[in-house]
Image (tube, rainbow, N blue to C red):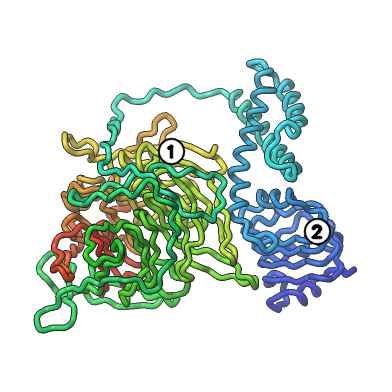
């Protein structure tokens, strides 16, 4: 038995230092330590300790009152610990190892999931998805059963105005009996269930006592509202989409285990944007299940060349200005943390076309100029360099391409599918040797309602989630939780999934955490940057809505929290419905850009001024606080997506004529911050005209730009069209 002293800890810790506060890792393994040898006061001096190894000792418990605020990894393998509840004092733990503690069971694993909100790995296994399922889904079910038992067995037996003594007596009896009456899950989790039920029951009684005290307090006199409040018009019903397909298609073989498996239902095809777009022929209803084709390293890609100037072999340089051409602004480059950034001396920038790719052709047919391309996203940078790789989807395929070289690096194809949405996330995988590595995972979905999870670097689609009964229209990952994926669908639902982290054999577990009911099809999703765990904003077919997505407060399914109303709603027209919000994106923590199809402009409005200051429990209607209105195309074509840059107040949007509208709002940032609208339409900073590239069949004059994106370093601009062409420009 060894008595721990300051000198012992300094000798065993790293980095070497004369002060305990400087230690970051500490190895006390195989020192025959008992619980009494661990001095909480001494340990609490290691305020920067991140990793603690106390394995292969004789500890019977983890002592209380140890303050290690930065502890991320705790190893107490091969001890005699009997209880894990003391781990709650280390809320930042991400990894715990306690195998070979004979008295700990699977119920203790579940307790640890609830006690440690940031835990990702337990005993060398990723438990992200399972832990979130226990924290939220399991918690909701047990809470519902506890409340139901209280309502049925105790609340109804109390008089309308019970005395404090009556409530105390009923509560005491309730806490004794509830742990034996509420049952859930397998018998192996019986100990955990009783422990969790007792906690929920105590919280319920505590909340009832608080409410009783509030009811006893004198209430202020009600204040009547003024009659001159601004009336918000009620959103009319949306017009029906056209061009839907009624297909029954066999789903490919799935490797994924999900908690809520949905049967494949008839899924509509997203309506064509262009009236001349063909209607995809229906596959046979008796068609057997189709095996998924893997990524292909060198797909048959037909580049579309742009016409060069006469007498010149280089591509024609395109100026972004819509006015007579002038010399582009000077620019200087600076390096911040190894990442190249552009600092423009003047507003705006010039571009030159690099590549025009036709890589989503059906059956690799070079004559296919009908496949529509819907969504794209730049791959997150895993190192200090900016990403030049972009993923695109449309038709039956998802492609990953290099913007610099114009080469299609990977191609994933599902016969009969039509991909509408994709999103990247970065996960931390553990190799078979136990080494951590970050990998970029791509999720994509579309007409079949299936989310396909891909690891492009290793040419693998490693899993599927049957997410919806109808087509997926939009998806996005949470910036706060790398495994949280939101999917929106034509079934009028937004679902939050935890996709989990695959192991080195790509086995994983996905869990459905939350379902949000939408009044119509969700077209755009935005998590509010200042509160990503609390609010989700969505542009839908019949308006703009916000949901409270706080998982601990949810019952598993909920409707929208508030609806935003815009000035365009008041415009009278028999032919147009301005409620379809098909463009929605945050410019910063407060400013939002949105547009309605057929609106002819883009609104810039404030989240704080709109929702945080106007929200009311009595009404779900909120007037959007519009700060500026940007001039845009007068087109009546829907689904032309707008995007924003991750750095700076820049906004991008295509139109029906092949133009790309660019707005640099830094010049009016002071005006926007004051919250005062000038009332006049603001002109775009630049407008890029379609350069009319040529194929073997001649010039492609007319096209529609569905999506425009710029990589974070503002090096490349990429546009997706309705003619199966990806345009890539170099930003000069």
The reply to whether residue 531 is in sight is yes
- Which residue is the site of mark 1? 517
**Residue 101, numbered label:** 2
**Residue 652, numbered label:** none
Q: Quadrant of residue 296?
A: bottom left
Task: Please name the residue shown 61% across and 23% down the image.
Answer: 216
Task: Please name the residue shown 66% across and 32% down the image.
Answer: 146
Check disc 2 and report its element: helix, strand or loop: loop
Quarter of the picture containing the N terminus is bottom right
Tell me if 689 is positioned left or right of 731 in this view. Answer: left
The x and y percentages for residue 3 are: 87, 68
Tell me which numbered mark, 1 or 2, is placed earlier along the sequence: 2
Q: Quadrant of residue 93?
A: bottom right
- In depth, the one of 597 and 155 nearer the eye is 597
The x and y percentages for residue 593 are: 30, 51
Mark 2 surroundings within 10 Å by alpha-carbon count, few (fewer than 14), some (14 through 19), many (20 or more): some
Tell me if 729 is positioned left or right of 18 in this view. Answer: left
Mark 1 surroundings within 10 Å by alpha-carbon count, few (fewer than 14), some (14 through 19), many (20 or more): some
- In depth, the one of 278 and 209 nearer the eye is 278
Task: Please name the residue shown 54% across and 54% down the image.
Answer: 256
């Amino acid at each position: 038995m060894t008595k721990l002293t300051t000198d012992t800890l300094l000798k065993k810790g790293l980095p070497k230092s004369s002060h305990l506060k400087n230690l970051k890792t500490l190895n006390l393994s195989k020192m025959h330590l008992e619980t009494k040898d661990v001095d909480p006061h001494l340990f609490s001096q290691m305020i920067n300790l991140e990793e603690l190894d106390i394995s292969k000792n004789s500890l019977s418990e983890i002592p209380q009152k140890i303050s290690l605020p930065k502890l991320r990894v705790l190893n107490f393998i091969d001890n005699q610990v009997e209880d894990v509840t003391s781990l709650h004092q280390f809320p930042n733990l991400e990894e715990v190892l306690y195998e070979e503690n004979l008295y700990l069971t699977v119920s203790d694993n579940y307790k640890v999931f609830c006690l440690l909100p940031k835990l990702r790995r337990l005993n060398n296994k990723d438990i992200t998805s399972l832990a979130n399922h226990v924290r939220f889904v399991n918690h909701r079910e047990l809470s519902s059963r506890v409340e139901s038992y209280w309502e049925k067995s105790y609340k109804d037996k109390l008089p309308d105005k019970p005395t404090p003594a009556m409530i105390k007596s009923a509560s005491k009896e309730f806490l004794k009996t509830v742990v034996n009456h509420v049952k859930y899950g397998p018998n192996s989790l019986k100990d955990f269930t009783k422990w969790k039920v007792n906690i929920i029951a105590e919280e319920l009684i505590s909340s009832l006592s608080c409410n009783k005290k509030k009811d006893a307090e004198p209430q202020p006199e009600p204040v009547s509202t003024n009659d001159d409040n601004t009336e918000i018009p009620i959103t009319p019903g949306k017009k029906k989409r056209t061009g839907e397909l009624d297909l029954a298609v066999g789903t490919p073989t799935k490797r994924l285990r999900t908690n809520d498996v949905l049967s494949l239902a008839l899924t509509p095809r997203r309506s064509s944007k262009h009236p001349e777009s063909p209607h995809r022929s229906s596959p046979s209803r008796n068609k057997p299940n189709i095996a998924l084709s893997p990524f292909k390293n060198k797909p048959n890609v037909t580049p579309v060349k742009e016409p060069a100037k006469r007498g010149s072999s280089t591509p024609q340089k395109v100026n972004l200005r819509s006015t007579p051409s002038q010399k582009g602004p000077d620019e200087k480059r600076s390096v911040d943390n190894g990442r190249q950034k552009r600092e423009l001396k003047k507003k705006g920038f010039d571009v030159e076309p690099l590549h025009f790719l036709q890589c989503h052709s059906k059956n690799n047919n070079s004559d296919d100029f009908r496949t529509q391309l819907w969504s794209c996203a730049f791959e997150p940078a895993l190192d200090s360099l900016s990403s030049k790789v972009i993923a695109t989807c449309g038709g039956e395929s998802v492609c990953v391409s290099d913007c610099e070289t114009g080469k299609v690096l990977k191609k994933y194809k599902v016969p009969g599918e039509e991909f509408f949405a994709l999103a990247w996330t970065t996960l931390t995988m553990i190799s078979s040797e136990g080494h951590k590595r970050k990998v970029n995972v791509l999720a994509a979905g579309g007409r079949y309602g299936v989310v396909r999870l891909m690891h492009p670097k290793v040419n693998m689609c490693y899993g599927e989630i049957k997410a919806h009964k109808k087509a997926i229209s939009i998806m996005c990952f949470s910036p706060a939780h790398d495994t949280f994926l939101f999917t929106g669908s034509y079934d009028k639902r937004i679902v939050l999934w935890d996709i989990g982290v695959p192991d080195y054999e790509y086995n994983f577990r996905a869990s459905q955490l939350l379902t949000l009911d939408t009044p119509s099809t969700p077209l755009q999703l935005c998590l509010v940057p200042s509160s990503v765990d609390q609010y989700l904003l969505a542009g839908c077919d019949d308006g703009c809505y916000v949901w409270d997505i706080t998982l601990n407060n949810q019952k598993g399914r909920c409707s929208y929290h508030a609806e935003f109303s815009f000035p365009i709603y008041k415009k009278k027209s028999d032919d147009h419905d301005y409620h379809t919000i098909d463009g929605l994106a945050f410019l910063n923590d407060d400013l939002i850009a949105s547009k309605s199809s057929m609106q002819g402009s883009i609104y810039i409005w404030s989240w704080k001024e709109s929702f945080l200051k106007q929200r009311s429990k009595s009404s779900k209607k909120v007037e959007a606080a519009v700060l500026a209105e940007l001039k845009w195309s007068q087109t009546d074509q829907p689904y032309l997506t707008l995007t924003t840059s991750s750095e700076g107040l820049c906004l991008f949007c295509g139109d029906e004529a092949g133009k790309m509208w660019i707005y640099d709002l830094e010049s009016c940032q002071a005006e926007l911050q004051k919250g005062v609208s000038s009332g006049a339409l603001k002109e775009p900073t630049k407008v890029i005209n379609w350069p009319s590239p040529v194929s073997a069949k001649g010039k492609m004059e007319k096209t529609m730009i569905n999506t425009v994106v710029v990589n974070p370093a503002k090096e490349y601009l990429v546009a997706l069209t309705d003619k199966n062409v990806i345009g890539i420009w170099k930003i000069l």
